[in-house]
């Protein structure tokens, strides 16, 4: 199956700093990637759809200036949590679909990044 | 409105027995896909099985089968011969077509505990 890698897996930062999380598709090209957020013992909430070469599409209620998404190439999308605060502490997980015609269109997920803001 | 509903926060099953995890969905899009994912305590999301809205037969993948009842809008996951390693969170998900922007949304999840 397709491989999606996410880095870092864990990050601890001070309040007010910015944190960048990278999501890479290792063996396929992903024109679209998805960023989800998961609070403890809760479901995955879609934050935004990352589109290669264009602006991300954010879900309602997600601050685009807080969560900056850049999809600069067909294999890399980044999520930057700007001026992080303790309430931004969460598990962030990216995913990508393989191109149409390959597979069932299931999402392949990165390992996830656990952000803790002190 | 909830589009994916998993009504069982937690389920217990005896090892080697079968278990059914419930999932109902809501969509007006004629073209959609239904998925089940497993999330162990490590946090990774593992794809288990897929059912397309136009598929006539229920999907099966090894010990996993999907009981697809389109008229009832349900897509229950059946795990046969449960193993201790099946203990995890299970999420039902749906991807709508154009109407839903091809986004995949997830249910609240069901935590499965397999007893020895």
Image (tube, coloured by chain):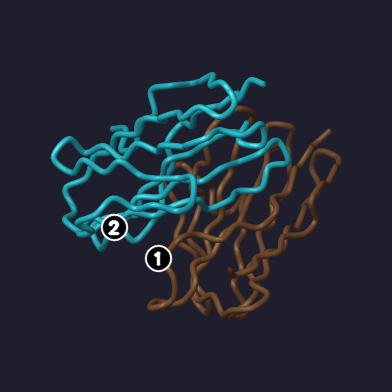
Chain colours: A brown, B cyan
Relative vertical location of residue B30 with respect to residue A10 in this rendering, above or below: below
Instruction: Specify whether A66 is left or right of A54.
Output: right
Q: Residue at x 70, y 53 (%)?
A: A111
Q: Which residue is mark 2?
A: B52
Residue A87, percent across and down?
A: 68, 32
Residue sitting nearer the eye, B28 or A85? B28
How far apart, in angstroms, are the residues tagged by discs 2 and 1? 8 Å
Q: Which residue is mark 1?
A: A104
Q: Quadrant of the N terminus of chain B?
A: top left
Q: Quadrant of residue B24?
A: top left
Numbered label tally: 2
Pointers 2 and 1 in contact (CB under 8 A)? yes
Q: Give the structural element (helix, strand or loop) at label 1.
A: loop
Q: Give the structural element (helix, strand or loop) at label 2.
A: strand
Instruction: Specify whether B72 is left or right of A90.
Output: left
Instruction: Specify whether B47 is left or right of A60.
Output: right
Chain label for disc 1: A
Q: Residue at x 66, y 31 (%)?
A: B84
Q: Residue at x 27, y 56 (%)?
A: B32
Residue sitting nearer the eye, A18 or A72? A72
- Crowding around mark 1 (Cα neighbors within 10 Å: few <14, some 14 to 19, many 20+) is some
Residue A52, percent across and down?
A: 53, 76
Residue A55, percent across and down?
A: 49, 69
Instruction: Specify whether A69 is left or right of B100.
Output: right
Q: Quadrant of the C terminus of chain B?
A: top right
């Amino acid at each position: 199956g397709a491989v999606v890698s996410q880095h870092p897996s864990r990050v601890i930062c001070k309040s007010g700093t910015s944190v960048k999380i990278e999501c890479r598709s290792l063996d396929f090209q992903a024109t679209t990637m998805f960023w989800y957020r998961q609070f403890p013992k809760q479901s995955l909430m879609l934050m935004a759809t990352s589109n290669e070469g264009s602006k991300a599409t954010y879900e309602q209620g997600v601050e685009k200036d807080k969560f900056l998404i850049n999809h600069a190439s067909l294999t890399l999308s980044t999520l930057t949590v700007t001026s992080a605060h303790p309430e931004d502490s969460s598990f962030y997980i990216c995913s990508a679909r393989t191109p149409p015609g390959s597979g069932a269109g299931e999402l392949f997920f990165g390992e996830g990044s656990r952000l803790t803001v002190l | 409105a909830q589009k994916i509903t998993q009504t069982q926060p937690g389920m217990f099953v005896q090892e080697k027995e079968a278990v059914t995890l419930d999932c109902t969905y809501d969509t007006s899009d004629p073209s959609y896909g239904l998925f089940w994912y497993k999330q162990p305590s490590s946090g990774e999301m593992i794809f288990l099985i897929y059912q397309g809205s136009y598929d006539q037969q229920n999907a099966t993948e090894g010990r996993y089968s999907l009981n697809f009842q389109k008229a009832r809008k349900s897509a229950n996951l059946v795990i046969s011969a449960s193993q201790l390693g099946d203990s995890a969170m299970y999420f039902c998900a749906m991807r709508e077509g154009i109407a839903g922007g091809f986004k995949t949304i997830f249910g609240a999840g069901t935590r499965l505990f397999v007893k020895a």
